[in-house]
Amino acid sequence: MKKVRVRFAPSPTGALHIGGVRTALYNYLFAKKNGGEMLLRIEDTDSNRFVPGAEDYIIESLNWLGIKFDEGVGIGGEYGPYRQSERKEIYKQYVDQLLNAGKAYIAFDTAEQLEAKRAEINNFQYDASTRAMMDNSLTCPQEKVQERIAAGEKYVVRFKIEPNEDITVNDLIRGKVVINSSILDDKVLWKSADCLPTYHLANIVDDHLMQITHVIRGEEWLPSAPLHVLLYRAFGWADTMPEFAHLPLLLKPEGNGKLSKRDGDRLGFPVFPLEWHDPKTGDVSSGYRESGYFPEAVINFLALLGWNPGTEQEIFSMDELIQAFSLDRVSKSGAKFDYEKGKWFNHHYLANKSNEELAALMAPVLKEKGVSCEASKLNKIIGLIKDRAHFVKELWNEMYYFFEAPTTYDEKAVAKRWKEDTPKLLSALVGFMATWDENISAKEMEEKTMAWNAENGFNNGAVLNPFRLALLGEMKGPHIFDVVEMLGVKETIARTQKALEVIK
Ligand code: GLU
């Protein structure tokens, strides 16, 4: 068996879309599952669409997410260079191979001429039915062609597609896809204007030279696959043609149509891994990283958008994904982008981080708030509240009351919880707490208080609900005696007394 080799081959035309990240991830999982290799190739032959910064952005995004390459741009390797703009000479010889074999031809038609043809003929397509009426090396005498080229006239090289042939693409996800070659046009493979190939030629030549065994890419490339099959055959490489796997689309949360950046703007979630500053428009688009997502949560979330393990398991580390992944379990139909689920994953990973790690992540916030707190106490506090947030930035809102006594009390909660007998009950409680040791544990104080309530015939809720309100200002937070343990008996008494003064 040949060693599995896959590639992620983005074009640096802007920020990497989250769907592109999923493509990179599935390539990575497939390669690692099969003991194979993955390379990063930058497909930058279309200089009109080149966006500065996009390549760095792609690399930084995948680094952040822990999707690692064995070879490629920024790493090197024996099949380089891996940036297509640096492979000009390599492509030229393959273009010549096709020209010499009569499998491609030279075309001089200018943009204006093509425009005129389109205006003249309905649904004009440059193909077997029309090429004889165009300005190309099939209609122009050989010496004249050479003269025109020598004179510097611009031309393109087009692939000569034979009509009326059924082409089969065996897709590992979709099965057999058959299309008739007559629907294909004679694609431009190379342009003399910049001496660069187009995507189709460069893609096939590189997949061949880089010994790619599996092409795993988005569904939007499926229509190109029959052309790619024909190119492999034209080069005589049909035997080593990679296997194809076209991944299902990521759909809008509502399920109708392809997920777009606009959906993200409209519904308030990022569609890019990192914040993106568009160098042309100056627009800034939000990213998962800056929005507070953990990379492992994004990976887990994306892995399940289009693939399922066939079990109920939802939480997967990267290693577990590698073990579980297979292309057979990638679905044919599009995957709805459920960003609430993405948040849920982040919540899960947040709640499962160690208190120490979260304390470190909270450090800048605590500094800004002027909070200084002994590490062991801070860790305990974080442990009490960490399952109440989706993001680190929400943690402060769940813990500020450990550091700041309330100055106001939620009016609705007061109306509901602060009863006529509350002052009597809480005053009694203050008296009772005054007998406690400052270091009393939550468990001990709970037992004491329950017993004390029972003895005095007090209803637990009637005592503890307004007590919470007095300590925190609202009806929120973890178990009340855990709160008291963190505040300490003295502070608890002070806060209760303050509430008794303020709330009338
Ligand atoms: N350069 C193409 C892209 O931007 C690559 C498509 C493929 O993987 O063949 O997605």
Image (tube, helix red, strand yellow):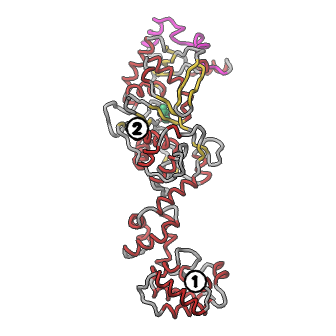
Residue 464, labelled with which disc? 1
Q: Earlier in the sequence, mark 1 or mark 2?
A: 2
Residue 111, labelled with which disc? none
x, y percentage for residue 441?
44, 82
Q: Quadrant of residue 375?
A: bottom left
x, y percentage for residue 247?
53, 37
Q: Is residue 500 visible?
A: no
Q: Is residue 154 above or below residue 426?
A: above
Q: Quadrant of residue 135?
A: top right
Q: In the picture provided, is 298 more to the left or to the right than 500?
A: left
The CB of the residue at mark 1 lies under 8 Å from ligand 1? no
Q: In which quadrant will I find the N terminus?
A: top left
Q: 115 or 383: nearer the eye?
A: 383
**The residue stretch that appears in magenta:** 123-150
Query: Image point 42% across, 87% down: which residue?
Result: 438
Task: Count neighbours of disc 1 (C-alpha within 10 A) and say few if under 14, some if 14 to 19, many if 20 or more.
Answer: some
x, y percentage for residue 2?
38, 29
For label 1, the SS is helix
For label 2, the SS is loop
Q: Is residue 417 above or below residue 134?
A: below
Query: Image point 51% across, 56% down: which residue?
Result: 345
The amino acid on which the numbered mark 2 sits, given as a three-letter code, is Asn
On whether residue 323 falls in the magenta region, the answer is: no
Q: CA distance from mark 1 to mark 2?
A: 58 Å
Residue 34, labelled with which disc? 2
The amino acid on which the numbered mark 1 sits, given as a three-letter code, is Leu
Query: Image point 55% across, 82% down: which residue?
Result: 407
Q: 434 or 493: nearer the eye?
A: 434
Q: Is residue 304 above or below residue 450?
A: above
Q: Is residue 438 above or below residue 277?
A: below
